Image (tube, coloured by chain):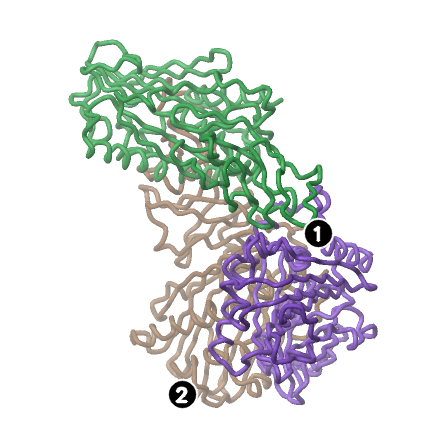
Chain colours: A green, B brown, C purple
Amino acid sequence: MTFLKDGWYCAGWKKDVTEKPRAITICGEEIVLFRDADGRAVVLENRCPHRFAPLSQGRVMGNVIQCPYHGLEFDRSGMCVLNPHGQKVIPPRAAIKSYRAEEKYGAVWVWMGDPAAADPEAIISLPFIEDERYAVVTGYFHVKANYQLLNDNLLDLTHSAYIHTTTVGLPPDIAATVKYTVRSEGNVIRSERFLSNVPPTPQFLNLFKEPLGDIYSYLSWFPPSSMLLDLSVVPHGSPKRPIEEPTDDAVLIPGAHLVVPETQDTAHYFYAVARSAAIDDASKTEAMGKLSYQTFVQEDAPMIEECYRLMGGKEFYSLQPAILESDRGGILARRILAKLTS
Amino acid sequence: MTFLKDGWYCAGWKKDVTEKPRAITICGEEIVLFRDADGRAVVLENRCPHRFAPLSQGRVMGNVIQCPYHGLEFDRSGMCVLNPHGQKVIPPRAAIKSYRAEEKYGAVWVWMGDPAAADPEAIISLPFIEDERYAVVTGYFHVKANYQLLNDNLLDLTHSAYIHTTTVGLPPDIAATVKYTVRSEGNVIRSERFLSNVPPTPQFLNLFKEPLGDIYSYLSWFPPSSMLLDLSVVPHGSPKRPIEEPTDDAVLIPGAHLVVPETQDTAHYFYAVARSAAIDDASKTEAMGKLSYQTFVQEDAPMIEECYRLMGGKEFYSLQPAILESDRGGILARRILAKLTS
Amino acid sequence: MTFLKDGWYCAGWKKDVTEKPRAITICGEEIVLFRDADGRAVVLENRCPHRFAPLSQGRVMGNVIQCPYHGLEFDRSGMCVLNPHGQKVIPPRAAIKSYRAEEKYGAVWVWMGDPAAADPEAIISLPFIEDERYAVVTGYFHVKANYQLLNDNLLDLTHSAYIHTTTVGLPPDIAATVKYTVRSEGNVIRSERFLSNVPPTPQFLNLFKEPLGDIYSYLSWFPPSSMLLDLSVVPHGSPKRPIEEPTDDAVLIPGAHLVVPETQDTAHYFYAVARSAAIDDASKTEAMGKLSYQTFVQEDAPMIEECYRLMGGKEFYSLQPAILESDRGGILARRILAKLTS
């Protein structure tokens, strides 16, 4: 299986990208990420071309990064600009790969393929993350599973009634009343779910709205593996509200789920969850953060890691999975990724 | 090396098989074991055919087990009997392998091969485990070595004088007076040892009998790797007593050693040790349990794991081992297993 | 990559070789090292030829070592001299490899190749380790990297100004004034560095001499991977002093760096650091030991392990490293090793 290099991947939340360099591996390539003296996010190959030291352990000095082992310095284009030793000759091979980076929606995005092909407009649209009308929590966790299993997980939310019973899930009998459609628009997948007149539930949603009314849960998947979960709870019988137009009679809870393949067997998961109601209530923000962590990190991740372990290194289809109707979104995503990487 | 699938393997002690499902890997296959509402031990493939979740993390509901991830339910034959989502269609692939299980001698036994070939009469005979005339301790441990090294270990008890010096071993000079024969009867190996007029020893045996007298130590090996160690201490000059006829002038100490290949590189080891003397003395039962644990888990297992590590992944005979007379039993077992799996 | 078997490797410091056997792996071969009743250092294959038990867990009894598992005994030539069981027959295969060992300069040296080819005169000359005019500290650590990266590290000391800033390094601007030559004499590499009129530095060197004056740092590399770092600090303008002729106006700080390949991916590192000044000052000896540990174990080793991890299992040249002028010594060592193992 090959990675989709021509794609934007979240490499970190903006606030975590500072003059202290950090390493992260995306699509099997170890990169170093830092902010230079001009305030720009810089992304370079992490391995020094001289003796292979990790630049992430070096120092950012103005607009260059210094190798921690022998002191070679590299600029943001990846060229070595100083060899401090002897005659100070810089051999032609003393250069590393540089990557196109963009800062948008509170995150730093990296294009892992040919920089010339990178179009910042292709980044998934997530303005709610920096919208002052929303209270936002962000997070990160690491998963020991192929990233496509995380796509599958989010594109089929029927699992919520089973593994999220104490967090965001509804009881199976209520969850079973969901009406949903799944369709693709070019390379984007839309999975739209609607639940009518939902009774009170003890967990997540009732934190923000009581009684619940109707629930719209619209998931949009963009290749390679970025998702927007546009969740809104509205009075029974009233229409869905767009994220950019929050109203007082509804609670909008948009979430970003940014899955990033680290290796074939591991993935990064950046998430942001926001709400339009009671945005100044710090205790609700804390509860939202705790429930998000519990849902994604303590419930989803261990289950997905076990599934991946049980696949025993085999390719998904070679295991002849039983495909259910509810798998439509996941299957479409796999088809789009196969097409884009072929 | 292939596993002998057509064989009965201990998958757990009866008391540990409850409505709470447990996973165990035998011969490289991960299975789930539970007791259904009818009280039957059920053994199924542990991997859900839908998205590969571990059924062992699911719930037993009456006579079905529910997948923890998306709620599919499977009956004891391995057929999916409920898809709770959408139109509730169950695709033909939604089925898992089921295994033949038997409860006998306080244990649950699983036949890893074709269920049609399974004959419960072929299970090694160990009635002493449930015989009220005996006090019994049972145990389990995990070993990081190929299971055949555990066969070798038990089929050559000369190691006792070296690694079990503070537990069940006799001093080398006494151990060297042993008379023994090793023979095969079909696919069963009998290794019979006799020690005459053994002086007092500080450990295991003197817990139960003083003076010792003569010791009969009869080991029977049944393929794939189940062993009965029929140990008895009798007055000097008197004959061996059969396990089913304990008498007051002798101490019978039968033991079951049930070795179960987990993978090529790891094994399960279930053991039961019983005695016919002072069976109501709880302190002696506790001492028997402690000494058994020390002997098998703290003395045998680490040595066998080191031997396996030093084999460096090589096949046994490719290392051109020096074969001693005392290896006869182990060599016969290897020959029988090679024949049965060829 | 193959190991250079025809070479002397440090297998331990003399004081650590006792009648209690110890295992160590060199060039991928696991050996056992002990001192017999005659006081000789004995080196044998660690794996018993019978059932592959580690002899290092056995007992030394006079001039033989007894296998911990079944009690077979082996003499210093590796022949089995006792099978304690049954008819006590010793099969011809009951023999293990024995290795040529020498004790010299406070260490035990093992020749991993054909014993007939071993010449003790080829051991690197390190008499200062046992010279009473020096205070000596010795140490050992384990490195998760191919041993050649340790050669590279020592043959290019320009890294000191970057990773040893709080221990043995000089500031980059002073370090940059170094004059040096690198040359090979047969299979030996001489890397000679000279620094004139060095101002006070807060760390290592000022422990022993103030003001510093001139610094001579002469490194000699002997295949496979033994190095002598002949460091001396002399009054400004005066010549280098030989190690065997310490004088009061200079501080001689010779060091031995004995790198030993354990596997392709790991190495042993034995070191000895000595000084000719204030040799009775225990607090200075303690400080010298602490600074050596910090320099080699806390600064060098983690950096080299990270470099090796980033090589991702690839061969050095296949990564097309940028070669600097300062790499000359390391490149020569790689060339000599390639020649000697081809």
Q: Residue B27 at what x, y percent from top left? A: 55, 49
Residue contact between numbered discs 1 and 2, judged by CB atoms under 8 Å? no
Q: Which chain does the residue under circle 1 lie in?
A: C
Chain to which the residue tagged by mark 2 belongs: B
- The residue beneath circle 2 is B210
Write down the residue under mark 1: C327
Quarter occupied by residue B39: top left
Q: Amino acid at mark 2?
A: Glu
Q: Is residue B256 visible?
A: yes
Q: Position of residue B200 (x, y in %)?
A: 45, 89
Which amino acid type is shown beneath numbered disc 1?
A: Asp
Q: Is residue B215 left or right of residue C230?
A: left
The circle on residue B289 is none
Residue at 81%, 60% (x, y): give it.
C340
Q: In what element is the residue under mark 1? A: helix
For residue B192, side relative to residue C323 (left or right): left
At 52% from the left and 45% from the top, the residue drawn is: A58
- Is A199 left, or right, of A27 in this rendering? left
**Along the viewing direction, whichever of B281 and A87 lies nearer the viewer:** A87
In this view, the residue in front, A114 or C172, is C172
